[in-house]
Image: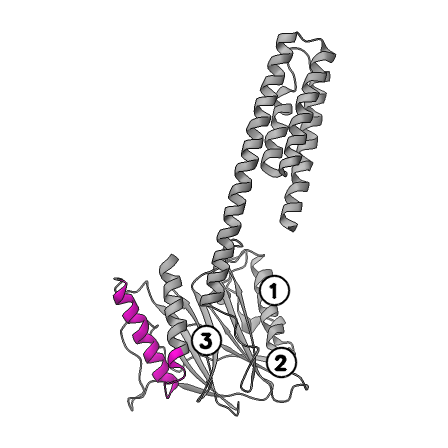
Amino acid sequence: MENRRTAAWAGWLLVVPVLASGVLLNLLAPQPYTGLPLLAAAPLIAGAMLPYRACVLVASVACAVSLALDFFRGRSASATVVDLAVIGLIGILALGVNLLLRRQGRDLARARGIAEAVQLAVLPPPPPRAGPLAVAAGYTAAQVEARIGGDLFAVQETPYGVRMIIGDVKGKGVQAVASVSVAIGAFRQEAENAPTLAELARRLDDALTREASRSGNAASDEDFTTAVLAEVPGDGKLLRLVNRGHPGPYLIHDGVIERLDATRPQLPLGMGLGTVATPDGDALTDVFRLPSGALLLMITDGVTEARDRTGTFYDPCASTTLTGRFMDPGDLVRAVTADVARWTCDGHQDDMAILAVARRGGRPPGW
């Protein structure tokens, strides 16, 4: 609604000067020069930028002004009829353009609504609380018109604690959305059954690889899913991480932000190439202490690859905004989103997903 009002004001700011200029040219310019082109341009501008009724008004005013000016200047009847016919025809074309744009706007709004419904179905918002954790998430599309993309996140309580995933499908278009659906569905199913986080990662890898085979897309270096899997046991004191080629998460506590890098790099999911293992044969899982009141920030590369005007990448660890104290993870999500927007001057080029959780111990009642 606000965008429509802004466009309408901009339309009037163009239409009024154009009409006025056409009148002045008709009154002041020497023969044979007239302001007819400007009078004809006014309905076209109105057709593209103003509501239908306003477009009818502008077209009618342009015709009336043309008729009055021709009578005032004493132009011949034939010239008056030609001028009126030209502006009238252009006014009719402007009304047609207006109707076409309105129809396209309705179709676009319908498509956006469908995309938003798909987004909510495939990637529903996480619960505000899960076990010992408070949870918040945010998703920002690279383009305002876009409502769905390849970033994903999920949080689920399981018999093994709270398990989380954040990831980024590197494929494009419908295939990326299908991969997001498969990854989220597999996570929902296997998070309840996989005895370890490493086993959960293996099962997700198998699911994505099978899906790629079924769809006829062989695993490649361009179609895969990077992800971080996290697990917080019921007491909330530990954080286990399996990082499959994704930007590392960040731990924020007592005004200090620390990136939790993987001990050893691992391959993304869906490539069908297995996992990195420790010397004793176990898949690699990193374990960190999760202090009371600490916040865990998990992001996609839309955050870490955001650039300012000089081409410098955004670094959460260097941000003074993120070292402040946050009352809940929702505040942290909003702070990161606003900080990236300031860094890029609202010009970020990639989708951006943010998942933040906080250990609720030590927080005010009702948190």
- Vertical relation: 219 (above or below) 364: above
337 sits to left or right of 232 = right
**Residue found at the very far top of the displayed protein:** 76
- Kindly report the distance in space between the C-alpha atoms of the residues bearing marks 2 and 1: 18 Å
Q: Amino acid at mark 2?
A: Gly
Earlier in the chain: of badge 1 and badge 3, it is 3
Q: For the magenta stretch, what is the residue range?
A: 189-215
Circle 3 Cα neighbour tier, 10 Å, few/some/many (<14 / 14–19 / ≥20): many
Q: Amino acid at mark 1?
A: Ala
> Which residue corresponds to the image point at 64% horizontal and 50% vertical from the top-left?
1
Circle 2 Cα neighbour tier, 10 Å, few/some/many (<14 / 14–19 / ≥20): few
Earlier in the chain: of badge 2 and badge 1, it is 2
* Residue on which disc 2 sits: 255
- Vertical relation: 10 (above or below) 225: above
Answer whether residue 196 is magenta in the image.
yes
* Residue on which disc 1 sits: 338
- Vertical relation: 11 (above or below) 73: below
Q: Position of residue 249 (x, y in %)?
A: 48, 76
Element carrying mark 2: loop
